[in-house]
Image (cartoon, helix red, strand yellow):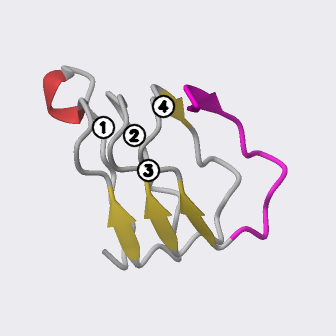
């Protein structure tokens, strides 16, 4: 199971599904073409998706987001 992932060089990527891992960190800084993201069932405590302007579907259930004081979810305009 994944705990950390870097996706910086996959700029044309449209869909990602990293559900059911042990991710504690994920960054989408250079993945501006993403329209579908499923990061459910991980250990994430913060996430920033503000740069994902094409995002239509976002699933982040069953993480530790609500437990963190640094919880950041900046939604894209399509959500």
Question: What residue appears at the point 47 percent right and 37 percent down from the top-left corner?
Answer: 21
Question: Spatial distance from mark 4 to mark 3, Cα to Cα?
Answer: 9 Å
Q: Residues within 10 Å of mark 2 (few under 14, many from 20)?
A: some
Label 4 neighbour load within 10 Å: few <14, some 14-19, many 20+: many
Q: Which residues are magenta?
A: 1-13
Q: Is 14 on the left-hand or right-hand side of 42?
A: right
- Is 48 contained in the magenta span? no
Badge 2 vs badge 1, beta-carbon distance below 8 Å: yes
The residue where tag 3 is placed is: 19
Per the rendering, the mark at residue 23 is 4
Q: Marks 2/3: CA distance?
A: 14 Å
Kindly state the secondary structure of the residue where label 3 is placed.
loop
Could you say which quadrant of the image residue 27 lies in?
top right
Q: Position of residue 14 (x, y in %)?
A: 65, 73
Position above or below: 13 against 31: below
Disc 1 marks which residue?
72
Indicate which disc, 2 or 3, sits on the residue closer to the N terminus: 3
Q: In this figure, which residue is indicated by the disc labeled 2? A: 47
Query: Quick one: label 2 or label 4, which is nearer the N terminus?
Result: 4
């Amino acid at each position: 199971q994944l705990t950390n992932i870097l996706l910086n060089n996959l700029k044309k990527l449209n869909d990602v599904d990293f559900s059911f891992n042990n991710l504690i960190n994920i960054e989408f800084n250079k993945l501006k073409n993403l329209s579908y993201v499923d990061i459910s069932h991980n250990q994430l405590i913060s996430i920033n998706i503000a740069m994902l302007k094409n995002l239509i579907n976002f699933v982040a259930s069953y993480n530790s987001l609500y437990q963190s004081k640094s919880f950041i979810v900046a939604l894209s305009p399509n959500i």
